[in-house]
Amino acid sequence: MAGLKLIKSKIKSVQKTQKVTKAMEAVSAAKMRKAQMKAIAGRAYARAAMAILSRISGLRELANHSLMQKRELKKVLYIVITSDKGLAGALNSAVLRATFADINSSGIPKESVSIIAVGRKANDFFSVRGFDVEAFHPNTDQISSVLIHEIVSEAALRFQSAAVDEVKIAYQNFRSTFEQLPILRIIFPLSLAELEKVVHDIIPARGVFSEVKNGIHPSTYTIEPSEEEVLNAVLPRLAGIFVYHALLESQASEHSARMVAMKSASDKAEEMRHALTLGFNKARQAAITREVSEITGGMEAMAS
């Protein structure tokens, strides 16, 4: 009987775990959809900003602006976006591996690489490996304009002061519910080509939002009061688009990966519950058979 009680307690434990994983799966699904809707809603702004950059791309002031200057790569700043929490499969490790591989392929020594970590996983990963983590920002569900401004300001200041020659951002790009792709984009020097890639990535490859069409046709405009003043105001906001949509893509990917991981855990828990129930029934049947055999044997002994 002690063996049956142990199996029964395991079944109850697995059932409780399954309830938790199913609840987490439902919560992650709702948060994933919310993050997708935010990204789609902001795509119009991103496309309009890209149109502005394309229209002023011929200006001499733009080509000579400090945020557009290409330099020989000696020092690089990486903005790495991961989650604060686990239970999301290989989501964080994929971004960290992609960033680490990019650092190794660039041939730049560790001392010339600095990190802005968004999310506890990125901060822990690079701190343990001896990289210079210049700033750490928690990655919560709330994406505030203050956070975006802080990240962009930190990166722009270091790039303009020539403390770094390039600024890259690494994050998980949401392709579909079951597919997230780690990706790296160049923020500074700012370029139209990289911004076009970001806008293109906002629409997922598959799913409900994959059929969203483009519908932005900005009108012509004149630059006032001066080219320099407008560029100083516009270019950091364009860089903010990179960070904002990277955070949204990362959130959608995190919740999607966690939803899939929790679904897998729920399925495994169901399999384990079924196996334990089958084992419990077999053990109980064996105990009943043994007791019947003992009773029958005792009756036969008494009759003889």
Image (cartoon, grey):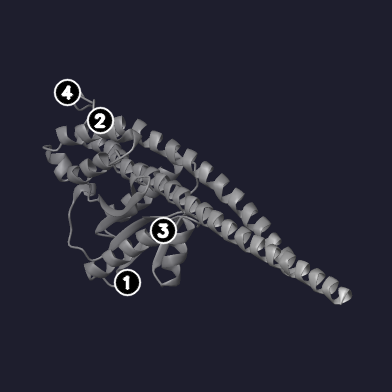
Name the N-terminal-most of marks 4 and 3.
3
- Dot 1 corresponds to which residue? 110
- SS at mark 1? helix
Is residue 293 visible in the rendered image? The answer is: yes
Quarter placement of the N terminus: bottom right
Identity, as a three-letter code, of the amino acid under mark 3: Asn
Residues at marks 4 and 3, CA–CA distance in whole angstroms: 43 Å
Q: Nearer the viewer, mark 4 or mark 3?
A: 3
Residue in the image at 69% along x and 63% along y: 285
- Dot 4 corresponds to which residue? 220
Q: For the image shown, how many numbered marks are present on the structure? A: 4
- Give coordinates of residue 260: x percent, y percent: 44, 50
> Which of the 4 image quadrants contains residue 36?
top left
Mark 1, residues whose alpha carbon is within 10 Å: few (<14), some, or many (≥20)?
some
- Give coordinates of residue 151: x percent, y percent: 39, 49
Mark number for residue 92? Answer: 3
Name the N-terminal-most of marks 2 and 1.
2
Name the N-terminal-most of marks 1 and 4.
1
Quarter placement of the C terminus: bottom right
Front residue of this view, candidates 222 and 145: 145
Residues at marks 1 and 4, CA–CA distance in whole angstroms: 46 Å
Mark 3, residues whose alpha carbon is within 10 Å: few (<14), some, or many (≥20)?
many
